[in-house]
Amino acid sequence: MEETYKDRTSLMKGAKDIAKEVKRQAVKKVNKAVEKAQDGYTQRSYNRFQDEEDDDDYYVQGGNYGVEANDDEGSSEATEGHDEDDEIYEGEYQGVPSMGGKDGMVALGQPVRDEYKDRRELETERKADEEELAQQYELIIQECGHGRFQWALFFVLGMALMADGVEVFVVGFVLPSAETDMCIPNSGSGWLGSIVYLGMMVGAFFWGGLADKVGRRQSLLICMSVNGFFAFLSSFVQGYGFFLFCRLFSGFGIGGAVPTVFSYFSEVLAREKRGEHLSWLCMFWMIGGIYASAMAWAIIPHYGWSFSMGSAYQFHSWRVFVIVCALPCVSSVVALTFMPESPRFLLEVGKHDEAWMILKQIHDTNMRARGQPEKVFTVNRIKTPKQIDELIEIESDTGTWYRRCFVRIRTELYGIWLTFMRCFNYPVKDNTIKLTAVWFTLSFGYYGLSVWFPDVIKHLQSDEYASRVKHFRNEEVSHFVFNFTLENQIHSNGEYINDRFIMMKFKSVTFEDSLFKNCVFEDITSLNTYFRNCTFVNTTFYNTDLEQYKFVDSELINCTFFHIRTGCQISFDDDYSAYWIYFVNFLGTLAVLPGNIVSALLMDRIGRLTMLGGSMVLSGISCFFLWFGTSESMMIGMLCLYNGLTISAWNSLDVITVELYPTDRRATGFGFLNALCKAAAVLGNLIFGSLVGITKAIPILLASTVLVCGGLVGLRLPDTRTQVLM
């Protein structure tokens, strides 16, 4: 009996040992399968898409990207017991995002949970996931095709880019009229142009960083709304200080257009279409310049459109021009409300379901436009990078609402700063430094010469105008009625006795060492008219704008003034060169058109780097022809040639910038470089503007040097023509 019990006990013990060994071997086998699957994902992220002939590996049975069929060794109980009736139809959306980057393998071997991993390990896993997503996303965009959706987004984003081009030109066009209308002194007139660039510089950095945090579409909607609101408001304000404030925030809003627009559009374009269509998009900036020039030419000279409400409120035609220039911005805001978010951004932040829906919308829209509505979108699972959560403490229970808002704003700003600092981390650090040099040199040379050209033309016009001045000496006129216009004249040592000056215009007229006795000045309008060292005896001034500052070292004896018009009287006829300035800007902007077309057609053929370096070097060489610019027509020809050569460099630089930065830093890096561009523009305006009329040598040599050096640095950038969007 005891032996039977012992045998039974031994048998049970042996069975337990065998069961433990079987369980141990089973766990070991499963863990081995998990490790093999994980190694397969890592290996695919680097090797699978290096050869385009292997693209078919992603189109596996069932339409799943990045999911391989299980072999016998990797099978588990989790895959057993399913009937064929449970299979999902090809192209049908499952409604479940991918599981943390390992596609559901967590349940098999139960690897280490994310909270027990250090940050470096999590970032390594995220980087591998991003590399795999980049390859997969390129194939998905190719399946979606290029058609109606991309063209619709092209025109919507083009309106936003057009608004940016308008903003650059609008200040220069309204500045002369605004200075006169608001009685701006010469010491304060330079602030208007500088403060707009300052707002655009801060806005480019802020909105670019925000686009990487909240999304391209949302950031663009907010920044364009800010621009449109303050642009409209600036057309109605009367005070110069408030006008500066509105233009500052208008520039702050429009500063986010360029980095966000190019980041947004590049993420819905396939590799072979990206360079060409981003170059076509650049044309809208030129269209904005042409629109602003044409509207200024058509609206500002018509001061009959103005109205006033008493003496406190004046609304002249230049304010109508400001409103018209805000229309592209408003149009883009309205159209953007019908556009979806960038699916590439949504995948980057782990929003798999939303990204899938948008990609399916792109696919279906393009297929319907092609006449193939029956074609099915075969993607039902997309790789999403591992999300690394940031813990934020906002004191929701004890803190007040404004304290929570302050913490939230501070956290977002700190997040933008951290994203910006990551632009200087490996492997994009070298690219950021090189791009900084290229952006700064190109902007410094382009905007510096852009402000130098018109000012040089104005100086040539002034010199020519002064060369035609008429001199009248020792005049003796008595009992005469002057009722016509006097222009560009100098009267010296004259005597005017019992004369009447009625309903006259004095334009650039100077009286020197003259005597006016028993004269009458009635209904007089003057511009650049002065009486120097003159004597007035028993003279009456009625309804004139001859204020005290126009009598320089003059003596007034027993003179009377009635209804003197004080302040600034605005009249387009006073500005003899305004029409010409609008026309010159129109021609200079129109000259960009051939360069835009050439760059769009050749961007993907000769490469971004060749076009960037070649355009900047040729632009620098073309500056030397300015030595021969001795007339207005020659300077205008040089301006058109320079603009036509430079635009190819701008287009190439925009394309290279969006392709060199990964998705999580693309808008931030572009925003930083665009902010640097505005800072270089202000610096160029200050330096080149101070040299106008002094010497030609320094501006020409300076612009040529920086452009050629920037072009040589640009040739050292990596070629992105054959790369997928990181």
Image (cartoon, helix red, strand yellow):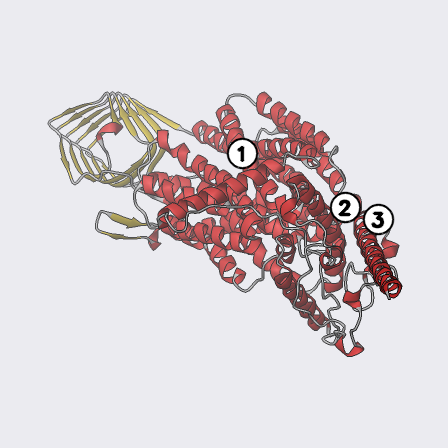
Q: Is residue 670 visible?
A: yes
Splitting the image into 4 quarters, where does residue 54 fall?
A: bottom right
**Residue 41 image point, x, y percent:** 79, 52
The Cα–Cα distance between marks 2 and 3, rounded to whole angstroms, is 20 Å
From the viewer's perspective, tell me whether residue 652 is left or right of residue 224.
right
Splitting the image into 4 quarters, where does residue 55 fall?
A: bottom right
Contact between marks 2 and 3 (CB within 8 A): the answer is: no
| 10 Å crowding of disc 2: few (<14), some (14-19), many (20+) | many
**Residue sitting farthest toward the left:** 558
Q: Give the structural element (helix, strand or loop) at label 2.
A: loop
Question: Disc 2 marks which residue?
Answer: 721
From the viewer's perspective, tell me whether residue 429 is left or right of residue 160.
right
Foreground pick, 531 / 449: 449
Looking at the rendered structure, the kind of residue marked 3 is: Asn
Q: Give the structural element (helix, strand or loop) at label 3.
A: helix
Sequence-first disc among 2 and 3: 3
Question: Disc 3 marks which residue?
Answer: 47
The Cα–Cα distance between marks 2 and 1, rounded to whole angstroms, is 29 Å
The residue sitting at 58% across, 42% down in the picture is: 668
Question: Disc 1 marks which residue?
Answer: 681
| 10 Å crowding of disc 1: few (<14), some (14-19), many (20+) | many
Looking at the rendered structure, the kind of residue marked 1 is: Ala
Sequence-first disc among 2 and 1: 1
**Residue 315 image point, x, y percent:** 31, 51
Looking at the picture, does residue 204 appear above or below residue 281? above
Q: Is residue 205 visible?
A: no
Foreground pick, 704 / 675: 675
Quadrant into which the N terminus falls: bottom right
